[in-house]
Image (cartoon, helix red, strand yellow):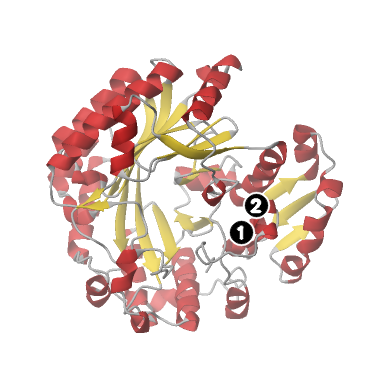
Amino acid sequence: MNSSPAFATASHSQELPSPTVLRRFDVAGPRYTSYPTADRFVDAFTADDYVQAVHQRAATGMNGRPLSLYVHLPFCESLCYYCACNKIVTRHKHWAVEYLDYLEREVALQVAELGRGAMVSQLHLGGGTPTFLDDEGLARLLEMLGREFTLSPEREQSIEIDPRTVDGARLERLAAMGFNRLSFGVQDFDPDVQKAVHRIQPAAEVFDLMASARALGYRSINIDLIYGLPKQSRASFDRTLAQVCELRPDRIALYAYAHLPERFKPQRRIAAEDLPDAKTKVEMLSRAIAAFTAAGYVYIGMDHFALPDDPLAIAKRQGRLHRNFQGYSTQPDCDLVALGVSAIGRVGATYSQNAKTLEEYYDLLDQGRLPVVRGLALTRDDVLRRAVIMAIMCQGHVDFEAISLAHLVDFRDHFAPELVALGPLIAQGLVHITDHDIEVTPTGWFFVRAVAMVFDRYLQADRNRTRFSRIV
């Protein structure tokens, strides 16, 4: 495995943000997997409101449109100190059997409202660690979903994988179950960093898994990385970047570590003095951008990269990119039915979230009730701003006339304060504005969240942004 970082300083300076600009826009902000964001959900939105949205979907003739399904599988065998996900750490495999029993009840309740046989074009298993479930458990889950929904033969079927939990033989069995997209959680290849975050996984094992996945013909393989972890340095992260480029996954997700030990207990095991300082963190991001663009990756938006022939890159070129609670997607903007503890879904102009603890999730299902405990019914202004923010996040382009006609507003008049607020971003070369549109520049794509934030009415009214991760 080549560990030379020489390519990391390849010349792409005409599109790369300067360290000064990176530092200036190193602010906290939402990831906009939805608008309004999940922190705006309210307890007043109940399961009854969710059912009403499902019935309205049928009444407006939307039942013929395909659904996206998300299933949250919360269990992990060991604790990763950086993790901020909703997970349950246990080695008791029988917990997964009980969880599947309750998932079956939830599916039945959902189908009672949606109608049996709804078409599904996208199925994603997330966690936690979905591969905590053994083959029998995953097969049971898929049989359950296939019995109640119509799984399109052309569907995307993806699963998040902890490389420590699978081998080549298991990847073959997953492929036989219909999985065609994989996401490997790598985070960093450096042994000292892995030890500091309690996630030891030798690079050789990941290389072997990648070779197996390629041989099995998976459509798309993603690698997750994190910068800003304890014990990381410019040199060590360069080595990881070189190894990832040698792996050449179809997609790369590069996340910034947000150290919030007051909110996430596992992070209290990370020594703050082991974290790279802000300057080093910015330099690691800059070098990663240079490495991936030099290696031929297309910058999709935020912290995602894809090879030019990957469907995600093609969708971006063709203006067909979408965004949902799982991130960027090639699928049309469809309703998302979410199953499992803490799962977040979207139906029509509503968002809903299930109970966050197993105890409450199980209790509601024992009562024969859908486990929805909070959510949001979007206002007309929410729907309008969602359209603008998603256009920024996905296409990097907002056409004033298209928005005006679709939402019956005069864009320049309605968003006059926001157009003024874009001034500093225009001055930094992040966006261009004409009489007809807003265009995010190549440099602006690295700060697309900052552009979208200008149109977030809730965020502009609430300056307390410490609950969000930083853009850089």
Q: What residue appears at the point 43 percent right and 15 percent down from the top-left corner?
A: 115
Looking at the rendered structure, the kind of residue marked 2 is: Gly
Secondary structure beneath label 2: loop
Residue beneath the point at 39% across and 16% down? 117
Q: Nearer the viewer, residue 84 or 166?
A: 84
Task: Name the residue tied to disc 2.
Answer: 396
Q: Which mark is residue 282?
A: none
Q: Is residue 391 visible?
A: yes
* Residue at the (32%, 27%) spot, across then down: 367
Looking at the image, residue 393 lies above or below residue 186 = above
**Label 1: few (<14), some or many (≥20) within 10 Å?**
many
Query: Do labels 1 and 2 touch, CB within 8 Å?
Result: yes
Whether residue 218 appears in this view of the structure is no
- For residue 448, the mark is 1
The three-letter code of the residue at mark 1 reads Val
Residue at (22% x, 59% y) in the render: 206
Q: Nearer the viewer, mark 1 or mark 2?
A: 1
